[in-house]
């Protein structure tokens, strides 16, 4: 077995739920596998059985495990994990990097959703929203001017995540805004990997600028196209280009005002 589940240095960790989540997200225990039994975990961590049961119940509540009487705790299928649970989302960001399927699922979600959210932001962004987007973009640019990729104590990657989060907030839709908070760690996972592997960060920054400008100029269609262009760059950096044509963006129905405009012309 690989590092997370076998490294004796991890035995001193007080958070058994984190220990098991890391092993599960890293693929050391795959759906259908049983995690170590309660007594084995008690011995490994030097804790009581009630402490172990509490940790296992945390993973059960998160959808990662199911308890089977007389057998133990088994990893559930990926589609049954509560990925929108903040703790699960946090585990995903911290531990899921080795799991290519999770990366693909997150990216596919972004391809389907972010162009639509950018369109909404172009229609509804306030001056405060624009300031948040522009500040995050400036932070990304300024961070690239430093060897450690930090500006004002914040990393380039964190500014990048803040940029996307600000666009979700600018949609002024409660559901999208909440989803951005929940998925923030998951988005951070892809941002970190794509920025780390990107060979043309200047190109990526220019694509981000076009999204910002389209939102500022109230150009919904251009904002959606620019957001898709950002994701095209991300997909290229991550080796996930195949998802771009296969996952369509959310379609926006023609509005009454648009129809009227056509008739008037």
Image (tube, grey):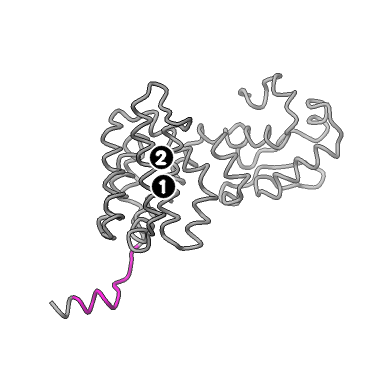
Depth check, front residue: 135 or 23? 135
Q: What numbered label is drawn on residue 76?
A: none
Which element is circle 2 on?
helix
How packed mark 1 is, by other alpha carbons closer than 10 Å (few <14, some 14-19, many 20 or more), is many
Q: Quadrant of residue 138?
A: top left
**In what element is the residue under mark 1?**
helix
Query: Disc number at residue 164?
Result: 1
Judge by depth and name the residue closer to the eye, 171 or 3: 171
Q: Residue at x 56, y 40 (%)?
A: 92
**Contact? badges 1 and 2 (CB < 8 Å):** yes
- Quadrant position of the N terminus in the picture: top right
Q: CA distance from mark 1 to mark 2?
A: 7 Å
The residue where tag 2 is placed is 160
Residue 251, relative to residue 210: is it above or below?
Answer: below
When asked about the image quadrant of residue 147, the answer is: top left
Q: Can you give x and y, in whole percent of width and height, for residue 29 in the image?
A: 63, 35
User: What range is drawn magenta here?
Assistant: 251-261
x and y percent of residue 107 in the render? 42, 45
- Report x, y in % for residue 183: 51, 48
Residue sitting at 62 percent across and 33 percent down?
A: 22
* Foreground of the two, 21 or 114: 114
Give the position of the C terminus as an image quadrant: bottom left
Q: Residue at x 74, y 24 (%)?
A: 11
């Amino acid at each position: 077995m690989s590092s997370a589940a076998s490294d004796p240095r991890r035995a001193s960790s007080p958070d058994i739920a984190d220990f098991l989540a890391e092993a599960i997200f890293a693929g050391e225990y795959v759906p259908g596998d049983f995690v170590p039994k309660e007594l084995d975990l008690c011995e490994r961590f030097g804790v009581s059985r009630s402490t172990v049961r509490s940790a296992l119940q945390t993973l059960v509540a998160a959808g990662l495990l199911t308890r089977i009487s007389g057998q133990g705790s088994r990893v559930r299928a990926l589609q049954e994990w509560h990925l929108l649970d903040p703790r699960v989302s946090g585990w995903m960001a911290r531990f899921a990097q080795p799991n290519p399927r999770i990366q693909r699922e997150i990216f596919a979600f972004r391809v389907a959703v972010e162009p639509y959210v950018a369109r909404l932001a172009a229609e509804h962004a306030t001056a405060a929203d624009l300031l948040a987007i522009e500040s995050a973009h400036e932070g990304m640019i300024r961070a690239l001017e430093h060897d450690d990729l930090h500006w004002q104590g914040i990393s380039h990657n964190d500014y990048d995540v803040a940029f996307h989060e600000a666009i979700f907030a600018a949609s002024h839709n409660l559901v999208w805004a909440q989803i951005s908070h929940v998925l923030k760690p998951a988005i951070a996972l892809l941002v970190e990997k794509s920025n780390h592997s990107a060979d043309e960060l200047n190109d990526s920054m220019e694509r981000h600028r076009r999204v910002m400008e389209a939102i500022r100029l109230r150009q919904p269609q251009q904002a959606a196209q620019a957001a898709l262009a950002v994701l095209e760059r991300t997909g290229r950096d991550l080796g996930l280009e195949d998802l771009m044509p296969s996952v369509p963006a959310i379609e926006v129905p023609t509005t009454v005002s648009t129809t009227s405009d056509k008739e008037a012309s």
